[in-house]
Image (spheres, rainbow, N blue to C red):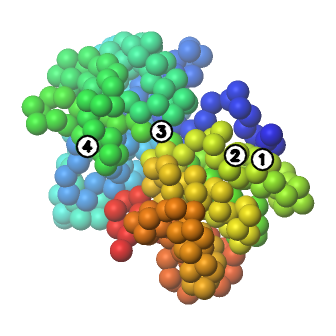
């Protein structure tokens, strides 16, 4: 049973910072027209990673970004021209170190941006299938020839290393761009406690889709977590229904083994990229022993980050939330010790 903005019948929401395909499809179908603009290559200090997207509407509305703001104006004008022509275009912007500061690139850089008008070189049915797959948390890639502009969706198995690294890019042939569309990042928070009230909005800003599991009615209320998805099942039942995958972080905050341990055991059997549990070193030691008694190996238990969060001297609930999100990011990006 759930409360909040999501129900079982609704698709997983996309982050407002990563919804260019969804907006492009909606604007096209509304008759506004749309061009999907994607960073396909970068060199130097380009501020947006390969695969970053900006969607430009036929009426001039925009969402997303392909740089730190230094080339967006030119991209928007070129995109509107591409929409009128009905053809794709590959743009290249280079900034020398001497001129970089004036236009927003700290040390200079070069980026290539692909413009794809929806309904023309980017077929509507291809974009529709991409949006559906993203909403259903299915892994897939979009492969496009930069010369012809012709693109199609391909199975994730075609690019296992790119999918694992979440890394879009141009293939060795110099002509094929592969855009990786992994499922949105999720953070499942067990325990609607004070720290969770700070962590959940922070995680949403960072691009995560938060879900709160809290069977205790006094804690898991819409007043304490306005607009958020709150699941009031017991944690083991909730994680079984939600599913745990490589794009999911599990954060255990209840401090109660009756609630934390069943979800923890499910996570240790799954492929969550991050598992964190609140508690002191003594508490974590006791948790460690319970997991051994439950039959888990030392290498399994080593996946648990406890005490949770980077050691930044955090004291307040908000500071602890910062430390948790920082540790999640470090693990996700391969920077954790």
Crowd tier of the residue under label 3, counting other residues whose Cα lies within 10 Å: few below 14, some 14–19, many 20 or above: many
Crowd tier of the residue under label 2, counting other residues whose Cα lies within 10 Å: few below 14, some 14–19, many 20 or above: many
Residue visible at 33% across and 25% down?
155
Residue visible at 75% across and 40% down?
5
Is residue 198 among what the camera can see? no
Residue beneath label 2, please?
A: 238
**Mark closer to the observer (3, 1):** 1
Does label 2 or label 4 sit earlier along the sequence?
Answer: 4
Residue farthest toward the left in the current orientation of the protein: 173
Residue beneath label 1, please?
A: 233
Disc marking residue 161: 4
Circles 1 and 2: CB distance less than 8 Å?
yes
**x then y, percent, for residue 190:** 69, 59
Q: Is residue 311 left or right of residue 70?
A: right
Circles 2 and 4: CB distance less than 8 Å?
no
Tell how many labels: 4
Tell me the SS state at disc 4. helix
């Amino acid at each position: 049973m759930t409360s909040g903005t999501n129900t079982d019948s609704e698709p997983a929401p996309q982050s407002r910072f990563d919804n260019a395909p969804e907006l492009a499809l909606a604007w096209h179908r509304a008759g506004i027209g749309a061009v999907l603009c994607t960073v396909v290559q970068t060199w130097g200090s380009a501020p947006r990673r390969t695969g970053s997207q900006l969607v430009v509407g036929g009426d001039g509305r925009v969402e997303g970004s392909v740089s730190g703001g230094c080339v967006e104006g030119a991209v928007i004008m070129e995109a509107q021209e591409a929409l009128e022509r009905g053809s794709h275009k590959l743009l290249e912007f280079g900034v020398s170190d001497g001129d970089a500061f004036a236009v927003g690139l700290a040390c200079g850089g070069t980026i290539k941006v692909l413009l794809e008008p929806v309904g023309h070189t980017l077929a509507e049915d291809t974009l529709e299938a991409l949006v559906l797959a993203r909403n259903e948390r299915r892994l897939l890639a979009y492969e496009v020839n930069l010369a012809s502009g012709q693109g199609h969706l391909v199975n994730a198995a075609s690019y296992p290393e790119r999918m694992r690294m979440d890394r879009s890019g141009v293939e060795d042939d110099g002509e094929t761009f592969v855009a990786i569309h992994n499922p949105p990042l999720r953070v499942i928070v067990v325990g609607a406690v004070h720290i969770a009230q700070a962590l959940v909005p922070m995680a949403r800003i960072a691009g995560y889709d938060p879900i709160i599991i809290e069977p205790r009615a006094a804690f898991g209320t819409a007043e304490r977590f306005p607009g958020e998805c709150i699941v009031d099942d017991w944690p083991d039942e909730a994680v079984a229904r939600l599913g745990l995958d490589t794009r999911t972080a599990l954060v255990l905050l209840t401090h109660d083994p009756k609630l934390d341990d069943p979800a923890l055991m499910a996570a240790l059997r799954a492929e969550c990229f991050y598992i964190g549990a609140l508690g002191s070193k003594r508490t974590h030691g006791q948790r460690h022993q319970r997991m051994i008694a439950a039959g888990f190996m030392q290498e399994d238990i080593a996946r648990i980050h406890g005490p949770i969060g980077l050691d930044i001297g955090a004291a307040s609930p908000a500071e602890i939330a910062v430390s948790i999100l920082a540790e999640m990011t470090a693990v996700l990006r391969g920077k954790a010790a």
